[in-house]
Image: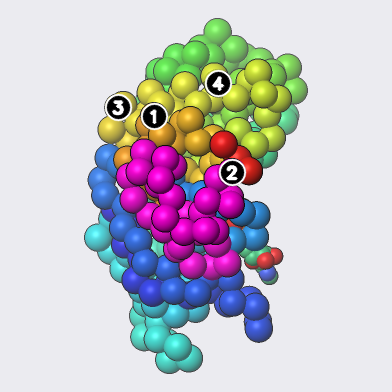
Amino acid sequence: MVQALDVHKRYGQLEVLKGINLEVRPREVFCLVGPSGSGKSTFLRCINHLEKVSAGSLSVDGELVGYRRHGNRLYELKESEIARKRAEIGMVFQRFNLFPHMTVLENVMEAPVRVRKEAKAVVRERAMTLLDRVGLKAKHDAYPGQLSGGQQQRVAIARALAMQPKLMLFDEPTSALDPELVGEVLDVMRQLAEDGMTMVVVTHEMGFAREVGDALVFMDGGVVVESGHPRDVLTSPQHARTKAFLSKVL
Ligand code: ADP
Ligand code: MG
């Protein structure tokens, strides 16, 4: 579903990704962990076409989305193709970013109706099904401000799913939540994984990674330091940097 070959990303002189190689298989829950500033969000933004790779090749769903050699541009998607591809990828951020002046149901319906011009009746039915799935059908008429952080994040997940994405990206989806609200969001993500969604999850929730994850990559300083099955990496990390990081978050 995602294949990165020697992916580099540079902001001016600052090289943030220094040759990332990894592969996310269909239906896999792929956990990305690492210290702040290691390039995790940047990598997700490259997958989602919010950033262009500086060098290397990145393909999503079997389609090349960025391919460059150092200094020598070889391949890039057109803007119209980027918009189409981005609609196939759902993203959930640390901050829920719901539209405050719209109800829960309107938030979930917004993108399919406005971006994809789907019929309202069809989208409404799908949105209600999704709200049921995240346990918030009864709140469809509420405004985001009337919901807890955990409920808002569950709406954000339903909103991303409303576009029927092939791939879901989660960037620290529970980091901004009060501890007692983390579980309900992880439960929704666990259910989504059981339903077969391909997911790339940046998280510090190692319990989730161990129980739900199929693969785990530890990143530091823009490189993949270590990767493997979450159980193996978390119980017997091979590198000193991985050990040091895990001793802080476990
Ligand atoms: P992480 O998500 O692992 O905490 P990020 O991908 O957010 O790391 O950031 C990695 C590095 O890239 C940081 O040093 C950050 O300051 C830098 N960075 C991220 N986005 C930009 C940008 N748009 N311009 C310049 N530097 C950036
Ligand atoms: Mg980040």
Q: Position of residue 173 (x, y in %)?
A: 58, 37
Kindly identify which numbered label has been placed on residue 71. none
Quadrant in the picture for residue 163: top left
For marks 4 and 2, give the CA distance: 22 Å
Q: Residues within 10 Å of mark 2 (few under 14, many from 20)?
A: few
For marks 3 and 2, give the CA distance: 32 Å
Q: Secondary structure at mark 2?
A: helix
Q: Secondary structure at mark 3?
A: loop
Which sits earlier in the primary sequence, circle 3 or circle 4?
Answer: 4
Identify the residue position indicated by label 2 in the image. Answer: 247
Number of the front mark, 3 or 2 = 2
Q: Secondary structure at mark 4?
A: helix
For marks 3 and 4, give the CA distance: 18 Å
Which sits earlier in the primary sequence, circle 2 or circle 1?
Answer: 1
Identify the residue position indicated by label 3 in the image. Answer: 195
Q: Position of residue 186 (x, y in %)?
A: 50, 26
Please indicate whether residue 193 sits to the left or right of residue 243 in the image: left
* Residue range (magenta): 218-247
Identify the residue position indicated by label 1 in the image. Answer: 211
Q: Position of residue 116 (x, y in %)?
A: 43, 44
For marks 4 and 1, give the CA distance: 13 Å
Residue shown at the point (69%, 19%) measured from the top left: 148
Q: Is residue 70 above or below residue 97?
A: below
Residue shown at the point (42%, 55%) measured from the top left: 238
Q: Position of residue 17 (x, y in %)?
A: 52, 70
Please indicate whether residue 245 sits to the left or right of residue 74 in the image: right
Residue shown at the point (58%, 50%) measured from the top left: 245
The amino acid type found where label 3 is placed reads: Asp
Q: Is residue 136 above or below residue 240?
A: above
Of residue 193 and residue 162, the one placed in the foreground of this image is 193
Q: Secondary structure at mark 1?
A: helix
